[in-house]
């Protein structure tokens, strides 16, 4: 009879109550931030073909989405504006119009759902005719000149009522610039959720369909990070912490769980994973073919991100996951 010659790990896996007792990581609906695309026009609910279940909503239709979000207990949304092509220009001025699509979107949500936290994505790529995240000169995106426009964008979003500013543009110094701009405008209490560690990624493809923001020439490799790099992520996070960020985002999530853990181990700010469009599209495509168990895959990946170290997850799966969490509780 063997006693004590090996460890019986299976004791703690015996049944579901025992497994629940020793479970280390839990998903909660408060962990989720749900992305919503707001488009110009009337009576629009346009499906995004590469993202089944995701739509662009015009302002007069977005209530149906927001009602569902609220009924599921989701408390935060991140808004993206989809302007008309005709309103795009070289400098992306539509990003900071008082009556631009994102400003109207933010105002609408805060007016009808004052309790819902509204995160505003601060970037120019949806608003520039060339689709880059700043001003372009001789084929390159100018850093400091672009910062000025990004500050205007952030301030206009705060004026419209955004609760959190989330700059995703990857210009150097954007946290300093936007913090100063917000403070000068009197928005001392509006936090910055920085896309601190944002890789140049093929996983953003479906988003660019949804937001109509693909670069018209070249790529974003001269401002978004090289996915081969790990130490660079710490340098990026370090600057943003020093510049006064209130949250750090790592993006994408699935291929970067090691980076999430690195950032978690080195910094104390609330950490956010962006479970991006391509990650969502892969799951939806495989599930539609009956090749995978969607619920199982989604819960496993979201728990995996939390286990890797994030506190919050921006995810297109949020509504489904909120439902599944409710069902299992
Ligand atoms: C704007 C922005 C992008 C995403 C979030 N904000 C696109 C990009 O950087 O090209 C991607 C989100 C996703 O893929 O779900 N710059």
Image (cartoon, helix red, strand yellow):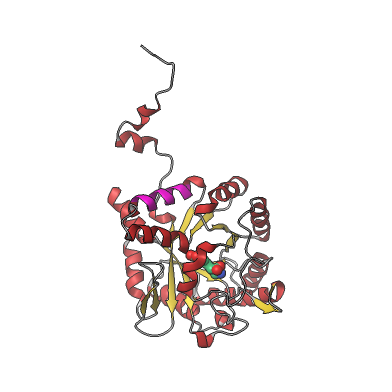
Q: Residue 35: give x, y in percent of width and height.
A: 44, 66
Tell me the residue at 34%/52% (across/down). 292
262 with respect to 273 (left or right): right
Residue 18 higher or lower than 308, as above or below: above
Q: Residue at x 48, y 69 (%)?
A: 207
Horizontal relation, residue 29 to residue 226: left or right = left
x then y, percent, for residue 250:
56, 56
Residue 248, given in percent of the width and then of the height, sits at 57, 57
**Could you tell me if residue 235 is visible in this image?**
yes
Q: In the displayed structure, does residue 213 sit left or right of residue 59?
A: right
Q: Quadrant of the N terminus?
A: top left
Predominant SS of the magenta segment = helix
Magenta-colored span: 296-306
Residue 163 visible in the displayed image: no
Q: Can you give x and y, in whole percent of width and height, for residue 126 in the image?
A: 53, 76
Residue placed furthest toward the top: 1
User: What residue sits 53% from the left and 49% below the top?
Assistant: 257
Q: Is 10 in the magenta?
A: no
Report whether 231 appears left or right of 280: right
């Amino acid at each position: 009879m063997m006693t004590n010659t090996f460890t019986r790990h299976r004791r703690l896996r015996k049944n579901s109550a025992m497994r629940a007792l020793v479970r280390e990581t839990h998903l909660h609906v408060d962990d989720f931030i749900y992305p919503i695309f707001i488009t110009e026009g009337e009576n629009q609910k346009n499906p995004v073909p590469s993202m089944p279940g995701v739509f662009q909503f015009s302002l007069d239709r977005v209530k149906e989405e927001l009602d569902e979000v609220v009924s599921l207990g989701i408390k935060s949304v991140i808004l993206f504006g989809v302007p008309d092509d005709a309103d795009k220009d070289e400098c992306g001025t539509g990003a900071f119009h008082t009556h631009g699509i994102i400003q109207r979107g933010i105002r609408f949500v805060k007016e009808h759902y004052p309790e819902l936290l509204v995160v505003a994505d601060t970037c120019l790529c949806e608003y520039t005719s060339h689709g880059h995240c700043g001003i372009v000169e001789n084929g390159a995106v100018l850093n400091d000149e672009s910062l000025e426009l990004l500050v205007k964008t952030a301030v206009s979003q705060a004026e419209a009522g955004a609760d959190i500013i989330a700059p995703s543009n990857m210009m150097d110094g954007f946290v300093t610039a936007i913090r100063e701009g917000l403070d000068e405008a009197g928005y001392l209490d509006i936090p910055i959720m920085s896309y601190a560690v944002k890789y140049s990624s093929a996983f953003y493809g479906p988003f660019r369909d949804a937001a109509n923001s693909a670069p018209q020439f070249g790529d974003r490799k001269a401002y978004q990070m090289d996915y081969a790099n790990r130490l660079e992520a710490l340098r990026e996070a370090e600057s943003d912490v020093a510049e006064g960020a209130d949250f750090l985002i790592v993006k994408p999530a699935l291929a970067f769980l090691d980076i999430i853990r690195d950032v978690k181990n080195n910094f104390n700010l609330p950490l956010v994973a962006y479970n991006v469009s391509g990650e969502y599209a892969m799951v939806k495509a495989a599930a539609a073919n009956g090749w995978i168990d969607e619920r199982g895959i989604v819960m496993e990946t979201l728990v995996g991100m939390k286990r890797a170290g994030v506190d919050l997850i921006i995810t297109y799966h949020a509504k489904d996951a909120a439902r599944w969490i409710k069902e299992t509780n």
